[in-house]
Amino acid sequence: MMTIMLSVMMSTIISIMLMMTCMMISQTTTMDREKMSPFECGFDPKSSARMPFSIQFFLIAVLFLIFDIEIAIILPMMTTMKTSYLTKWSITVTTFMLILMLGLYYEWKNNMLEWLK
């Protein structure tokens, strides 16, 4: 019991210290025109620092991240097959794959994978 109390106290102290350190570090400073402008070797910038961002590129990047994470979830499924019931494991894997394929079909039908429109 004493070990648990000590662990809780230490984790609380460490998290409070981290929060206070972050608060001290992230105090806002006064922003003036010079600090807000982009730095280009002392010269005035030739174009706007805020370039428009392609929403289509953002969607493709999010889709890549989603499928990348799903692959990281699929890989350990092979090792868990040995230690779990085969019917429960196969239902879980089939449901997971079905959700993935339905998501991909939805993205395909809504032309979310088209780069040029």
Image (cartoon, rainbow, N blue to C red):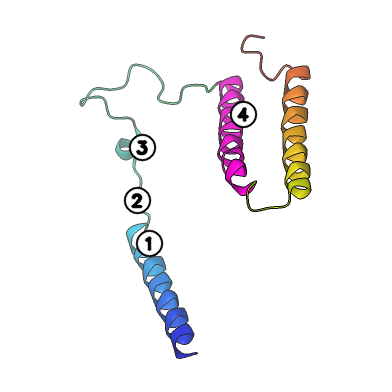
Residue in the image at 43% along x and 74% along y: 11
- Circle 3: element type: helix
The first of marks 1 and 3 along the sequence is: 1
Q: Are marks 4 and 1 in contact (CB under 8 Å)?
A: no
- Residue position marked by numbered label 1 in the rendering: 22
Residue range of the region highlighted in magenta in the rendering: 54-80
Q: Which mark is residue 78?
A: none
| Vertical arrangement, residue 107 with respect to residue 99, above or below | above
Q: Which mark is residue 36?
A: 3
- Residue position marked by numbered label 4 in the rendering: 63
- Circle 4: element type: helix
| Vertical arrangement, residue 30 with respect to residue 19, above or below | above
The first of marks 2 and 1 along the sequence is: 1
Q: Position of residue 68 (x, y in %)?
A: 56, 33
Q: Position of residue 103 (x, y in %)?
A: 74, 30
The first of marks 4 and 3 along the sequence is: 3
| Vertical arrangement, residue 8 with respect to residue 115, above or below | below
Residue nearer the viewer, 85 or 97: 85
Lateral position of residue 42 relative to residue 49, left or right = left
- Circle 2: element type: loop
Residue extending farthest to the top is 116
Q: Amino acid at mark 2?
A: Thr
Mark 4 vs mark 1: give the one in front.
4
Lateral position of residue 36 relative to residue 95, left or right = left
Asked whether residue 23 is drawn in magenta, I would say no
Q: Position of residue 37 (x, y in %)?
A: 34, 32
Q: CA distance from mark 3 to mark 2?
A: 10 Å
Lateral position of residue 36 relative to residue 81, left or right = left
- Residue position marked by numbered label 2 in the rendering: 30
Residue in the image at 33% along x and 59% along y: 25
